[in-house]
Amino acid sequence: MYEQALKVTVGLQHDERDRLLTRLDEVCCVCGSFGYGVSDEMRVLFSKYVSDED
């Protein structure tokens, strides 16, 4: 589901995209307490769809 949200979000216009990427990044931070490498995998997906230039 997280990857699907990233796929849709990167296709949006800049203002809306930036707002949603911030929210998805916050979701990843919250998932850090889940354990089992969940947030690590989410970080990998985030970096796959979002470049440092965005």
Image (tube, rainbow, N blue to C red):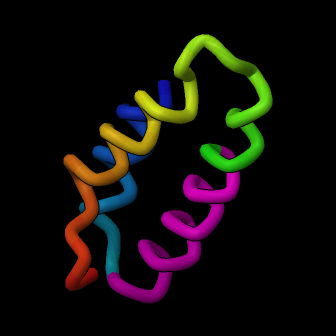
Residue positioned 70% across, 34% down in the render: 31
| Foreground pick, 6 / 40 | 40
State the extent of the magenta-drawn residues as a range. 14-27
- Depth order, front residue of 9/31: 31
Q: Is residue 18 magenta?
A: yes
Is 46 situated above or below 39?
below
Give the residue displayed 56% in from the left and 33% down from the top. 39
Which residue occupies 38% across, 57% down?
9
Give above or below for 47 relative to 36: below
Q: Position of residue 13 (x, y in %)?
A: 33, 79
Residue lying farthest to the top in this orientation? 36
Q: Quadrant of the C terminus?
A: bottom left
Q: Residue 22's quadrant in the figure?
A: bottom right
Is 31 left, or right, of 50 in this rendering? Answer: right
Q: Quadrant of residue 38?
A: top right
* Magenta span main SS: helix
Q: Is residue 35 left or right of residue 1?
A: right
- What x and y, as percent, mark residue 48? 20, 47
The x and y percentages for residue 26 are 68, 57
User: How many numbered circles are shown?
Assistant: 0
Asked which quadrant contains residue 28, the reply is top right
Q: Is residue 8 left or right of residue 33?
A: left
